[in-house]
Image (cartoon, rainbow, N blue to C red):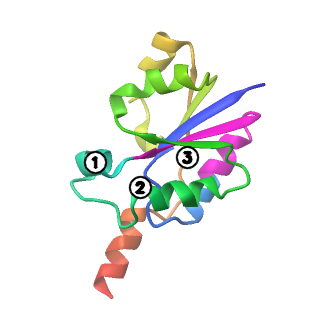
């Protein structure tokens, strides 16, 4: 069995989220998803998510190709989460290329960066909605 782990905010859920999660799941037999806490999201983006962490967890948990979801409290704890969930592969979007390469050396977990869906991002969706 090959366990895949990935992380994200998954705010204002859109087809790009579906695509990356589905592609991540296809790399293994089990997909574990860490949903960034509201506090962590604020520290990354200097704003709180539109949807609460509980709502975002519920949304991601409802996907048939997601096996388990947990709350991610810190970017610096990736190695602990990987060990806790016995993950074989860490999958991240290619906007993070190189940022988590250290994980392989520290945990032995493979790191794969997947291309994001072109022409869609949560930030862009939020900006469009705010303009309306």
Can the viewer see residue 117 in this picture? no
Task: Give percent across and percent down for residue 77.
Answer: 38, 26
First along the sequence among labels 2 and 3: 2
Circle 3 SS class = loop
**Residue 123 location (% of width, % of height):** 36, 64
Q: Residue furthest left?
A: 46
Q: Marks 3 and 1, how far apart in space? A: 26 Å
Quarter occupied by the C terminus: bottom left
Q: Is residue 39 left or right of residue 59?
A: left
Mark closest to the chain's N terminus, 2 or 1: 1
Q: What is the distance, in whole Å, between disc 2 and disc 3 at their CAs?
A: 25 Å
Q: Is residue 110 covered in magenta? A: no
Query: Which residue is found at the position 31% from the left and 50% from the top?
Result: 41
19 over 35 or under it: above or below? below
Q: Which residue is mark 3?
A: 115
Q: Which residues are magenta?
A: 20-36
Q: Is residue 34 magenta?
A: yes
The Cα atoms of the two marked residues, 2 and 1, are separated by 9 Å
At 68% across and 46% down in the image, what residue appears?
23
Q: Residue 87 or 119: which is nearer the viewer?
A: 87
């Amino acid at each position: 069995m090959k366990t895949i782990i990935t992380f994200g905010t998954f705010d204002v859920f859109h087809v790009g989220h579906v695509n990356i999660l589905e592609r991540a799941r296809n790399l293994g037999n089990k997909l574990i998803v860490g949903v960034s806490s509201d506090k962590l999201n604020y520290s990354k983006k200097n704003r709180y998510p539109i949807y609460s962490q509980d709502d975002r967890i519920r949304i991601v948990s409802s996907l048939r190709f997601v096996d388990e979801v947990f709350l991610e409290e810190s970017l610096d704890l990736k190695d602990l989460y990987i060990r806790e969930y016995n993950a074989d592969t860490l999958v991240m979007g290619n906007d993070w290329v190189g940022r988590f390469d250290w994980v392989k050396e520290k945990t032995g977990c493979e790191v794969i960066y997947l291309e994001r869906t072109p022409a869609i991002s949560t930030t862009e969706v939020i900006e469009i909605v705010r303009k309306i």
